[in-house]
Amino acid sequence: MSPSLKAIFRLILFFMQKLSNYCLFLFMLSLLSLYSCANDVVSSKCDALDHYVMIDSSKLDNKVIIIGIDGFRSDAMTQETTPFLYEFSQRNAYVNLSHLTEEDTYSGPNWSSILTGVHYDKHNVTDNSFDGRGFHVFPTLFNYIEQYADLLNTSSIVNWLPINQYVLSQDVDFSINSQLNDSLVLQEASKVLLNDDPHSADVLFLHFDQLDAAGHNFGFSSSVVEYSASLSILDSYVDSLVGIIDNERLSGENWLCIVVSDHGGDGDSHGDYNNVHIRETIFIAEHPSLPFKVNHESNMTDIAPTVLDFVGITSTEFDCKTDGQSVLE
Ligand SMILES: [Zn+2]
Ligand SMILES: [Zn+2]
């Protein structure tokens, strides 16, 4: 090859290499934008449609209590440790002790999925910092209730404050934004349920955190005394709350009771989705007479559609965005 041909050849090679780098760069860029736009694609697909909301006025008097228990490992729910929950799960109810967490097993993503009805790749909460949260695009179930049925009184009483700070305090009528322990959560919840203080509760979210703390400090297992003792205390709290609800049912109120957890645990953590004791947790939805789905494998995104279904709110926007299903038949 003559020197000049060689030079031309090198020049071509040089440009080809540049071009392939550039193509690779473009390809990576498009992958990246595809990933970061996943939320926007769903939201713009849903936002482009003409949405409507249907309210079933016969259901607007219905009431819901969601009892959230952080870090509830399924196999710790036994007749011995949790006598009330054991009996409660024999009632007319949807019961799943293999209720599936998000693949991201932090608390933040899972409570966010419970409250929005979408998976974490949409609401974008990937850890407990709640950075990047997209609740303006994927609103919480309480946001829908307040938008379309604002006569309903909504409350959120939590031990783990980030739930109110980052997710719910803007969306509910009443929330407590100072630190409560579990027994104070029970006390405040009982006030709202019994004395209508500060107002009667129609849809109430509660979060108990001390079981998760016992798990991190001593181990997530029914064979760990501190963990099972903490679970037994919570069992008595649920007993007391459902006792109030059962009384209100006797006076004609139509309540749906939900007990749900965000993840299980093993050893002193809950970081590994591949571990069945972490990945599977509990979800119980109980009502005296309504039929529930059978053979349905629930996950975190099923709670929000269940609640909206029960209070008679059908939003085509929510239905377009949600990844979950109501467990009511
Ligand atoms: Zn948690
Ligand atoms: Zn934890």
Image (spheres, rainbow, N blue to C red):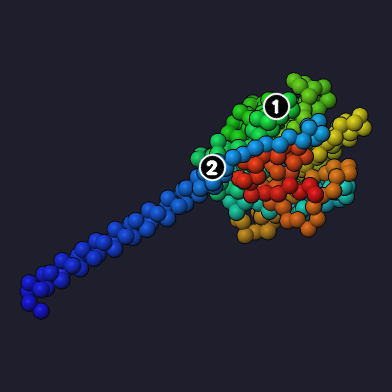
In the picture, measured across the screen, residue 28 lies left or right of residue 152, that is left
Q: Are marks 1 and 2 in contact (CB under 8 Å)?
A: no
Q: Quadrant of residue 147?
A: top right
Closer to the camera in the image, 121 or 226: 121
Q: Quadrant of residue 238?
A: top right
Residue displayed at 50% across by 40% down: 132
Q: Secondary structure at mark 1?
A: loop
Residue 126's x, y, as percent?
Answer: 54, 46
> Can you tell which of label 1 and label 2 is closer to the viewer?
2
Q: Is residue 79 above or below residue 57?
A: below
Q: Is residue 110 visible?
A: no
Residue 145's x, y, as percent?
Answer: 69, 32
Residue displayed at 82% across by 22% down: 195
Closer to the camera in the image, 20 or 130: 20
Closer to the camera in the image, 44 or 196: 44
Check disc 2 and give the amino acid type: Ala
Check disc 1 and give the amino acid type: Asp
Q: Residue furthest bottom?
A: 1
Residue displayed at 70% across by 39% down: 314
On residue 48, which mark appears?
2
Counting residues from the start of the chain, the first of labels 1 and 2 encountered is 2
On residue 320, which mark appears?
none
Residue 267's x, y, as percent?
Answer: 65, 53
Q: Which residue is mark 1?
A: 150
In the picture, measured across the screen, residue 73 lies left or right of residue 6, that is right
